[in-house]
């Protein structure tokens, strides 16, 4: 019994696993996960109020946009919690590595998938897969289709990241990451709340910009502003040319007066008299 206790202490202090296998799924772990979800979606509510009043989404459209993220984030999170317990070693570090890869490489895959769906929507006429566009009035069927597509993107992200995690060098990363934190509760708070909160806030904000629909009036206004800008530049250039032309006309008229033959004799006669 004493030998087992000494082995556990040695592993803990040597940078092995700090939190136990069920640390992510005990009461404290689930409390941190629920708190993280509430804080993360609070930033999306704040983002809606940061939108200009003329372009602010209705609560229904906002719910349609953000619920896709909610479903996808839940799938990714539950998959990370389950996968963290399948690796050997500290599950907190494995969860954090998965989370960081999902927030970097995964975001690139999400962006590519959304752009492909929007391209297919324009070329094939599949309006239901155009993310952020639900028809008038908003259709629940279009929202459900986009939810399924987004969850499918999350599955692709998780499969890609899991295959990438099979590389051998992640063992060295696992031994290094979070090794300075000896307290398992503090480590769990960093892994499940502190670090994910700031990264999720940025990721949710960016992904919401991918998913939300930009109205044609906004695009037309942007194009109109660019046309006005080009017109102003052209007007200034024409005005500058006109000014230069008027100055050259004045110089030419002065030269013509000097070279006028009728004025030359008069000038000479005046000199001789």
Image (tube, rainbow, N blue to C red):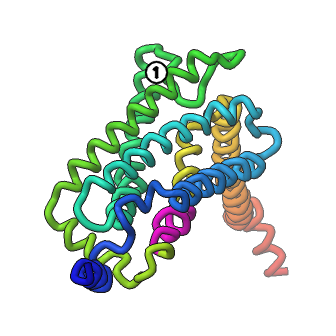
Does the magenta run of residues contain 220?
Answer: no
State the image coordinates of residue 65 (x, y, percent, origin top left). 61, 35
Q: Which residues are magenta?
A: 187-198
Across and down, in percent, residue 55 comes to 75, 38
Left of 95 or right of it: where is 243? right
Most extreme residue toward the front is: 1
Q: Nearer the viewer, residue 233 or 219?
A: 219
Q: Is residue 118 left or right of residue 89?
A: right
Location of residue 75 with respect to 49 vertically, above or below: above
Q: Nearer the viewer, residue 61 or 210?
A: 61
Q: Residue sitting at 80 percent across and 73 percent down?
A: 269
**Around disc 1, counting alpha carbons within 10 Å, would you say few (fewer than 14), some (14 to 19), or many (20 or more)?**
some
As rendered, which of 143 and 183 lies closer to the eye? 183
Q: How many tags in the picture?
A: 1
Residue at x 46%, y 28% (from the top left corner):
118
The answer, for residue 202, to whether it is visible in the render is no
Q: Observer-nearest residue: 259 or 177?
A: 177
SS at mark 1 in the image: helix
Residue 103 occupies which quadrant of the picture? bottom left
* Residue 190 percent location from the top left of the image: 49, 71
Above-or-below relation of 244 to 146: below
Q: Is residue 42 visible?
A: yes
The residue that label 1 is drawn on is 121
- Kindly report the secondary structure that dominates the magenta region of the rendered protein: helix
Image quadrant in which you'd find residue 224:
top right
């Amino acid at each position: 019994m004493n030998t087992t206790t000494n082995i556990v202490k040695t592993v803990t202090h040597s940078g092995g696993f700090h939190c136990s296998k069920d640390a992510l799924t005990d009461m404290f772990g689930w409390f941190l996960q629920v708190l993280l979800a509430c804080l993360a979606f609070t930033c999306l509510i704040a983002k809606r109020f940061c939108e200009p009043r003329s372009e602010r989404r209705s609560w229904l459209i906002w719910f349609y946009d953000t619920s896709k993220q909610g479903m996808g984030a839940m799938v990714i999170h539950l998959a990370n919690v389950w996968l963290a317990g399948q690796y050997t070693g500290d599950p907190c570090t494995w969860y954090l590595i998965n989370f960081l890869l999902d927030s970097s490489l995964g975001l690139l895959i999400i962006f590519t998938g959304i752009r492909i769906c929007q391209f297919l929507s324009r070329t094939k006429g599949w309006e239901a897969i155009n993310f952020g566009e639900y028809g008038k009035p908003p259709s629940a069927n279009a929202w459900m289709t986009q939810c399924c597509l987004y969850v499918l993107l999350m599955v692709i992200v998780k499969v890609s990241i899991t295959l990438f995690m099979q590389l051998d060098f992640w063992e060295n990363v696992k031994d290094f990451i979070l090794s300075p934190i000896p307290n398992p509760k503090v480590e769990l708070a960093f892994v499940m709340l502190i670090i994910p909160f700031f990264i999720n806030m940025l990721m949710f904000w960016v992904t919401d910009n991918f998913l939300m629909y930009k109205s044609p009036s906004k695009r037309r206004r942007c194009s109109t502003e660019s046309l006005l800008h080009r017109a102003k530049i052209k007007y200034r250039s024409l005005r500058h040319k006109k000014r230069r032309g008027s100055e050259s006309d004045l110089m030419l008229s002065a030269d013509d007066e000097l070279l006028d033959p009728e004025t030359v004799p008069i000038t000479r006669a005046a000199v001789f008299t």
